[in-house]
Amino acid sequence: MIGLVDCNSFYVSCERVFQPRLNGLAVGVLSNNDGCVIALSNELKALGIKMGTPAFEIQYLVHQGQIHLLSSNYELYGDMSARVQEVLEEYTPAVEPYSIDEMFLRLDGFERAQLLEHARQLHHRVRQYTGIPVCVGVAPTRTLAKLANRAAKKIPAYAGVCVLHPDSRETQVLLKKIELGDVWGVGRRLVERLAIIGINSAWDLAQADPKRIRRQFSVTLERTALELSGIPCIEMNDFHEPRQRIMTSRSFGKLTGDISEIREAIRQHGQRCAEKLRYQNSLARAVLVFLKTNPFRNDLPQYSPSLSVELPRPTDDSREILNAAGHALQRIYRKGYQYQKGGVMLLDLIDTNRQQLSLLDTPQSDADRNRSQKLMSVMDELNSRMGRGTVKLGIPSPGAAWHLRCNNLTQRCSTRWEELATARAI
């Protein structure tokens, strides 16, 4: 059996763990640069505010004290997600992260009678140990587990936990009630095409002839149909599989044409890419840098260049990556433009342990290689223990245009010593 644990209103829940005063209030979390709402509490949804609503359209509700809008605090959310995973790993044979707030569980070895009680225990322990409310869905396939999780969240009688068996009457009734658009991987256009041949519910798709579904639609939809009938067909990609490309980019807090400010942004992005590269034990052969102006500003000239630079040899050293990124930026930058976004991408990645030098690569002595590895290792260790950015190459200018707008950023209580929560006696 497979379980799916989904954190309820995750970003808002993370904020509430350290700010109990927000419990019961209408709370929303904003996207980068405080642009639009990307996470909503149930109280905020009840006011009719939807995902993606621009922040400026509801500022009047903030001024009236009806709602609370917070800047996205991804460092906090990432740490809380890791804590939820640690709890699940303590009570589950294997955990497969699907997103920052969803994790699949392998529940092999549990007897049918034990599953419901174990799922309830997971539901309780995560809330007890992390403060994050979750819903738990359990079924023989990932697609059914998704639907079980949805039922656990939407139907009060389940109280946050739903276990589905393919041969049960309960599963049949639930599938007949679920519309196709609510099935994992079935989009709006597929819903319209399936309706033409009389398939209108999850149950209809589960009972359809898989070969006909494959012939008329795709092998992907055939797998979905089989999964709905209780036959496992979808395997998750290995979460720990190294990525083939690594990119870091952000929109600037405001438009800028200042080369020194843009250089600082590229330097920060390059360092972050290098950290990710070392984390997955890879080396990069090339660095790509890009800039973008605002395509919606018709009153401004447009220019969106990019350039990749080959590294002298495969490396994970932040200094070499930043040096290449700096050269690329110098070549693509043009005066007279107001830039909105910049980023760095590492290309042609290889496994550190399987490095094979080309005849064209610049050789590096063992002593230089060892010094580089030790330096990067110390930097990563200090940043891990003391908070990201404790040790960095170059000091960013305070208030530079490239900094994100985070006017309502909360404390990163779980990862920054200087931002630890404080308690006061009254």
Image: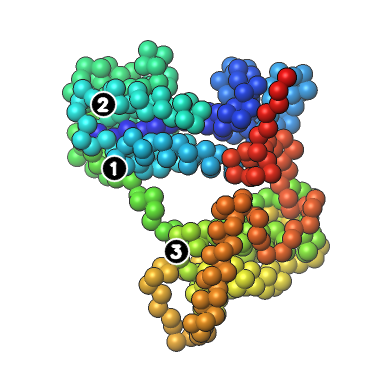
Circles 3, 1 touching at the beta carbon (< 8 Å)? no
Cα separation between marks 2 and 1: 21 Å
What's under tag 3, amino acid-wise?
Asn
Q: Position of residue 256 (x, y in %)?
A: 78, 55
Horizontal side of 15 relative to 208 (left or right) equals right
Name the residue carrying label 1. Answer: 234
Q: Position of residue 328 (x, y in %)?
A: 65, 71
In this rendered view, identify the residue nearer to me: 169 or 269: 269
For the residues carrying marks 2 and 1, which lies nearer the camera in this image?
2
At 45% from the left and 87% from the top, the residue drawn is 359
What's under tag 2, amino acid-wise?
Leu
Q: Which mark is residue 281?
A: 3
Q: Quadrant of residue 27?
A: top right
What kind of element bears circle 1?
Answer: loop
Circles 2, 1 touching at the beta carbon (< 8 Å)? no
Q: Quadrant of residue 119?
A: top left
Horizontal side of 10 relative to 98 (left or right) equals right
Q: Position of residue 231 (x, y in %)?
A: 21, 36
Q: Position of residue 167 (x, y in %)?
A: 18, 23
At 54% from the left and 70% from the top, the residue drawn is 374
Closer to the chain start, of discs 3 and 2, is: 2
- Structural crowding at the residue carrying mark 3, measured as other residues with C-alpha within 10 Å and reported as few (<14), some (14–19) or many (≥20): some
Name the residue carrying label 2. Answer: 115
Q: Is residue 224 visible?
A: no
Closer to the chain start, of discs 3 and 1, is: 1
What kind of element bears circle 2?
Answer: helix
What kind of element bears circle 3?
Answer: loop
